Amino acid sequence: MYGLASRSATSTLELSSHYTSGTMTVPDISKLTLGSRKPEYEPQLPEDIEDDPDRYMKKLKQYALSLPYSIEPYAKMLQMLDFILLRITQCVEAKDYDPGLVQWDSMLSYWATLKYPIPKEKRMLLTKLYFEICVTPGISNSVIAICADGLSNLTRSKKKLSVEDIRLPWRPLYDTLRKDLFLTRRQFEYSQLSWYMGHIAEIVRRFFHPATVNEMLATFVPVINGTNLDSILTSQYYLLTFLPLTHPQTYLPMLTRLWESINSYMFDERMLEFLSTLAEMHVDPTISDPAKLESIPDDERSEGEDRPRWVHDDLPASPKWSGLYKDVGIFTEHEWNFIMCKCLTSMDISLKDAGSLTTGPSADTSSSFELSRLPNATWRIRSLARIIVYSMAQDGISTPASDAPTPMYTPLTSGVNTPQIPYGFVGDYVTGFFRGWNPTQKTYLAGSKALDSLARLVASTEHFFHPTNSGSWTADLTALLQFVVYEFNKRWHEERQEDCKTPPNRRLTREMRRELVKSIRTVVLLAMFSQDSTTVSNVQSCLKSMCTMEPDLIFQPIIERAIPSLEALVETQRTLSVIKALSAIAPAIYSREIYYPGAKHLIAILQLLIPGIDLNDPTKTMCTTAFLSEVSQYVMFHDVASLENDVGDVGPSDAPGITTREDTSDTEEIDELSPADEDALLRDSTGSFATWIASFIRRVIQLLENLPDEGANGAAGGASEALLVDAVTGACSQICVHLSDSLFDLVLDMIFDYASTNVRSNAVRAIHQLVECVANANPGKTMAKFFPFCEASIRAEIEHGASSVRTTSTSTSLLSDATLHWSLAILRGTVYNDGRVLLKYKERFLSLLRLLQDKTFSKRGFSWSAKLLSSALVTLTHTYPTENKFVNPDLWDDPEFQRKHYLHWGKLYKPEDLKITWHVPNAEEIDFALEIFRELVEPCLDKLSQLLSAEIRDAVWRNDFCRYLCFVRQAFSGIPTLYKEYISPEVRRAMFDTSDIIHEIPEMIASIDSLNAGFCLTDPTDERYRYITNLKRQFGEFLHQASLTLRDQWEENTVDAVQMLISSIRVYLLEYGDSRDGYYVNAEQYSSEIGVARYYGGQKVWPRAVLVRRARFYHSARLHWNSIERARGPLEDCLLDDVVEWCMWHYPTVRQSSQALLESLTSVYDGLRVRALPKLYKALEPGTEDDRMKGALWTLNISAIGRFAITEPTLATQFIITLLGCHHNEKPSIQSCVASVAENTASRLLEPCHLVFQVENAALAYASQKLKRCVAPGLLEDPIVAKARAKRVERVSHIDNATNETISAVLKVASDADTHWRYAIAATRALRSLIRRDLPIARDHLQFFLEKLYDSNPSMRYYAQRAVMKALRYIKLRTYCPDPASLALTNPSNPLKVEWPVNDCKTSTDEIFDAYFAKKPVTPSEHLSPNSLYFDDMLEGWLACRETRTAYRPPHRHASTFQWEHESKDAIACVREMALNADFWEKVSGYFAEETQESVVVQDHISCVKSIFQLLGSEICDVVKKKVEALLADPDKNKQRAAAELLAGLLNGSKHWSMEEQERVWDWAKPHAHKTLNHTMKTETVAVWSTFLDYMFHRKDPRRVIPLVNHVMDLLGQMDLNGQSAIDSVKVLSLFRAFYTGMGWKFVPWTDSVLERLWPEVNSEHDDVRAYVAELMSVCGGIKWRPRPSSSDVETLVRECRTSHLDHDIMGIRGTYHTQRVAELVENLKRWREERLPGVRAFQSTYDRVGVTVCRWLYQSLHDTEAMSAFDYILPLLPEIFRFTEISDHEELARRANVLLFRMCGVIPPRPLISPLLEAIFAAIRSSPSWKVRLKALPILQVLYFRQLPLINEDKVVDILDVLCKCLDDDVVEVREMAGTTLSGILRLSPRRSVLKLKDRFVKLASKSHLPNRDSPLYNLSLRQRHAAIIGICALIDSFPYTIEKWMPDLLTTVMLEHAHDPIPISTTIHRCASNFRKTHQDTWHEDSYRFTEDQLAALSTLLTGSSYYA
């Protein structure tokens, strides 16, 4: 009952807390595996499951067959489902959402865990119902969260529901999200509603009808405003979250055009996620078929939805639809290149300057925090991977096969005669062949453009994978590759399914798969040795996928790196890396299907890994054991080498699971053996298994011997040692399970020999785990081997006095007890096995237990003996799988399998092929368990009862109590499934009456029927059942009596007994059902095992171990079902009361353990919290002892208790009052407790709101009725609904009364002068939370806040201000919200609000701007026009318009606008009385004017004042005016700030006063404002008055503040900006800045005149003035940006984005506004450069001033949303910017120019400007007379090439190479070397043919460049020519840093060596290149050296070191 009910107060996760606690007391059943045995119990399948052909019923059948018992018939479970659904509909009809709906939804969730399918019709109706609940106005967030989870679960499978089955309306979600997302200035409380609405929209968007696209576009597009980032990002979110994905052909071009024009990282991330979803979805062409639009019923339209029909005649209308395929996937070539540019910028690679990455994050800083309330987009790296993979297809001509490890792209042809080498024209000679190129048809890697792009991306970033050049970018780069291969693998297997709908010609090919692996292999192998854990994890995942794709390309390189690292002593990091890599490619080792030759390497690898088990290196040991565990669960360890060789005839077809490669074409030379030869080698290698197993066990034993000494708790060493032992024994266990009989006997003998001849006190726990390993594998042999030894040893030790010293607390064990503990540990390991094996030793075991019970007196002795008892009982009575081998038991036992087991390694199973052997307790085992209870447990209980009545309670008594109770406790903990509990009707009724669910009818408190779950005893009339239940009840009664007895003893020496008692209560109350095989533990382990075993997404076959875990998980789910609802009878109530009392006991350790237990109990026992709270409250009353009070407080701090008390309104009163009453105890520790409780519960005190009960949702009612008719067709009248409705009304009344009572009580405390200030603040926060939206605030409630506005405590004032704002805002909302739904959505109807019809969007926008600029007040008129209306929010019209614009009429001339609600008259009167008192404003303003750290106005102050003036109107003006005037007259900055805050509040509050009143206020304020802004404003108050103006201009029509606008503009016009002091100019410009930033797009009318005024100041004498000019240039350019469709309606815009040419600037992103000014600058800069002053006065030159201003302006433009427009201004200025960089006497100008050039490279230019931009850089390099300019331009060219690589066409690549090669002949050495560096980076991605041609040219140039004597006039020229050739050769070598091309060895060992001793700089260049070569190839030299001959190696060694280093 409560398990279902508790979700209203506790999370589902909390239900698992008691299952995971106390796991050390008994063995972990989840690890239990036993020897194979045929099942003794065949489950009987119900007929309706057996015969149903439905695919989901077949899945249920698989689950049913995996269990050893029968499950319930489907019909019975459907009845249960119908009952649950009926209750849900009744809750909805009664509007009993919480707790009613919450209860029954939790029931549905639990029902779903049983894997019975929900019929489709009911799934559809329930989905519709949940959706309507979510969009019902006023519904609580907790209910929305629950229904959102339900929607997610119901719609997760796309096969179960589609848009053909169900449609949903989109507008209700949008309306709620739109209203909730952005907060008003007076709104500070916000919830997760926006997140939930967005989340739900993402879930259900596929059920929006495709015909809604046009309406959505017409709704979302008009609110896009490019000058406002919030507008852009929110509109984008609406578009990408709501638009149906099935038919994007109409809107996708518009979205991509918009994307290209926006510079925003946040925009990119969400767009990439959207495109990745489209790319994956539309590999199936049928999805986007336009014919589907008509076939899908359009039957779901909410109010206001329309279906406008637009003309789409430009779209293809072929009768046979072929999909959305374009140039690359669903993208055009331009779109694809743009995406790949975004991919490059996403890698976070910094080049030269961090800003060269991308300026998008800088632009995003202007976004509002509210956007973070929306669901986050998928990580862009994953999105990019999906886009790349799902865009792959055979869409181009395939590139000829290459032997390059990282393939290059398109080779080009050439054919020109080689020119001669004229002196001085080296560049022409080298690049002459470029001009003769005649490119043929372009080819692509594997014929795929997307794959080719990926290869180019990898090649361009190859250097950043190397560990020596790693950084944060390496993790991103490797993550991209990880996701690419994962998605590729997933898609590959999807396309191999029969139902795949991807056309055959669009599917992935084997060539693509092979080339993909080859493309990324080199970089993955480089990153493998990274020291970053994230990178290594990514690489491991990548290698795993790659080895399943193309193992022959991956396996050998890993092995070649691994073996040397494991054989030799190398650095630890490298060893760890190779072990992790081996784990990653383990599938290629053990799976014959994945890589047939890999298995023969297994034994060699295993032998090399033996030293990896090292106690001194835990990390290496963990990696080694992970590999061993991975491999050992897929192979059998059995020596078949000595058997007759009879497998010679086994071919590929005979070996199961072998896949013969269809495509083995590869240029790499691989000697492949036949399968028979591979089998022969593998067969021979199995002969080494025995040697390896022996070495492994010896190594494990050695590790155990060297463990640190065990501590008092029995653990050896610290946490790391414990984890290490767990890992080693885990691997050992997996190995033992898969040993052959002979090898198992070997291992068993070795472990027995060690265990029987040694006693290690430091390895007691470890030997237990080691013996457990062999016991799991073969319990019979293990028990036979160890039991006699252990029995004899234990008896001997007991006889000689072991464990005879009485102890009850944990302590270090005595050495004399070591042998006993050693033997007990071993015996515990052996008992952990099949119960049937234990029966053979029944009498001896029972006798041994009696001895231990009577003779073990030490804590460790009796506790371990009790654990032995518990292990035995669990093994006897629990249901669990008895084996976990990698093949089914029948196959394992097959002699043929034993001989050829290696053919089956890595075998995977389908679920239907699984056969499991379960242990099901038989009658003999049950009887043995009961005998143990009779012989051991029952006598113990009797002795315990006698002990309670003993008068003397000394140490002996305490010891006897603890050890006897320990045995009883452990015995009951070992039988969680021995019998099934039943709840009697009487107990159930009592539980309903005392439930934690308050004020609910019993029918709505969810309860369950028990199900079959493998319990041993299920018949209550069975004598055995009665015996064990009576005995357990006797145990419970004893525990209660013991609690009563021990609570009276306060002695410290009873603490151990109390702790034992609390642990026993835990067992009694919690150990049942899945407590030992926990549902949540199994869920986590199943998920973990799935993750480890997964080869690819969507995998259908699994290792057998995973399927066994799946069956165990399902079994635990059924156990969990029976554990949800536990009986709470009188005895349980007593024990629960005892636990509460122990939570408040005197000793902290007891309190802590009791509180932990109580937290677990709250999730199981309904009614506990209501029962416990009165006791806890009583303990907080005055006079209570400090310890008891602390215990009560920390108990209330338990989230399940404290949050329950504060969130239940009828309980919150007592909780709050009790907590606030704790100030009577001033002890600091007590007050610290109180503070913790208050802090943890304060946020949970929610504002009561019952508006949802007043909202009528017809769609919800209809959905509920439809579902109800479906599940209960004959139910005409439903009395339960009426009963629940009446109870809900009663509950609401109780809540309202309780809330009023709470307010009154808290007010009393908060108003009491004796209340401590901290408690007063807490009370104030509570009172603020209780201000309600649905009911008016009480007078005394509001008066309290008003009085606290001038409290001396600043925190009190802070909370009071916000409370006043909240209360007055709610008055406004209640007044102008026409209905409860509007009030719930905070959607008031302003009486002045109107909709102005729009005929033409652009015309109407211009009319509004003209009205702004006219500077005329708005005049009321019946005719609606811009001159008679205010337009405060000017966002629409930038891109398109709706049919109307929202505007506001001016208020009436005389009458007041607002007539406040009558119900709030008392509150308003209270505000009026306070505000009319001058003393009130004196005090408030006094605190406003306090000295603080604030240098700007405080918005809360202004908003609070504004709220008061808005409410009361002008009647209080006169009171405030005098105070404002007085403050304005005081020059102190704090007084000025207070004046600004009061004035802003007054003026903003007058916004809707009558026009007459407004004029009076402005007439008064105008002279004061003018005087202040003109004269009295000082430097220190500039920020105050600037922020004042910013607040005044925010979201206002400028005509509302005409006096301020006019004054600011007048100040700007009159000010001499070049006066002697810059201070006055800065003051004016600061005020002006507030104007244009506050106005945003509304500033457009002023831009021309303002720039005309300020443009001449571009060379102002004052730097600050120039900074403002630069900013204004950027701002004006941004707000003047406007798209240019032919018509500003959405239909035209969307259509023209589809049809217009790429170069047509439909988005208007090209910078044109400043074109004339830039042209003027270009001309003037030439003149100013000639007039420039030299030396130290240079910075005063006009040239320098203007240069700095230009750099500032362009830099800021590049960091704005419209950054692309800056290129139109940069381009003509580029020559001059390059000149700026070489200026040496003005550091700032040179630095700014340099930064600007690099930042420019991080922004994607408009497509038409890419070539001109490159030409401008070429011009700077070719024609600049300054070598410094050339030196600066070359890195810019390289960075630009890297960043914009996908957008640069091949002609420009040729031009780049031409320029660089000519620079190799530059006169200046530095330029030549920089050209070489740049050339190497560009050659890496250049056509291979050009590389070969360049190599030939450079070699010839070097050979023909003869050096004459130094005295010769031609010497320098010849030296330069040779240096140019050598630099070119070095650039070629450097361009392939991690591979050896065919031509490279000869180049290194002949040409380079020949010139190694040439004069400087030639020799310097050669040695630098050689050094780089050695550095980059040292990791792969074992492979690379094979590319050289012996002679070449010797020559290379001479080049590198002068000796044969590499020989």
Image (cartoon, grey):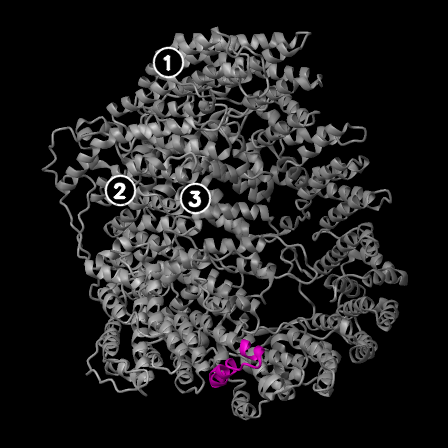
Residue, disc 3: 122
Is disc 3 placed on a helix, strand or loop?
helix
Which residues lie in the magenta part?
Answer: 1769-1792
* Vertical side of 1740 occupied by 1318: above or below: above
* Vertical side of 1733 occupied by 1319: above or below: above
Answer whether labels 3 and 1 touch (C-beta < 8 Å): no
Compare residues 434 and 1647 and report the one nearer the observer. 434
| Residue at image location 70% in from the left, 61% down from the top | 186
Answer whether labels 2 and 3 touch (C-beta < 8 Å): no
Looking at the rendered structure, the kind of residue marked 1 is Phe
Image quadrant assignment for residue 433: bottom left
Q: Going from the N terminus, do you reach mark 3 or mark 1 first?
A: 3
Looking at the rendered structure, the kind of residue marked 3 is Lys
Compare residues 559 and 1517 and report the one nearer the observer. 559
The residues tagged by marks 2 and 3 sit, at their Cα atoms, a distance apart of 48 Å
Question: Mark number for residue 526?
Answer: none
Tell me: 1678 left or right of 1213: left
Tell me: 1593 left or right of 1697: right
Residue, disc 2: 589
Tell me: 1537 left or right of 1767: right
Compare residues 484 and 293 and report the one nearer the observer. 484
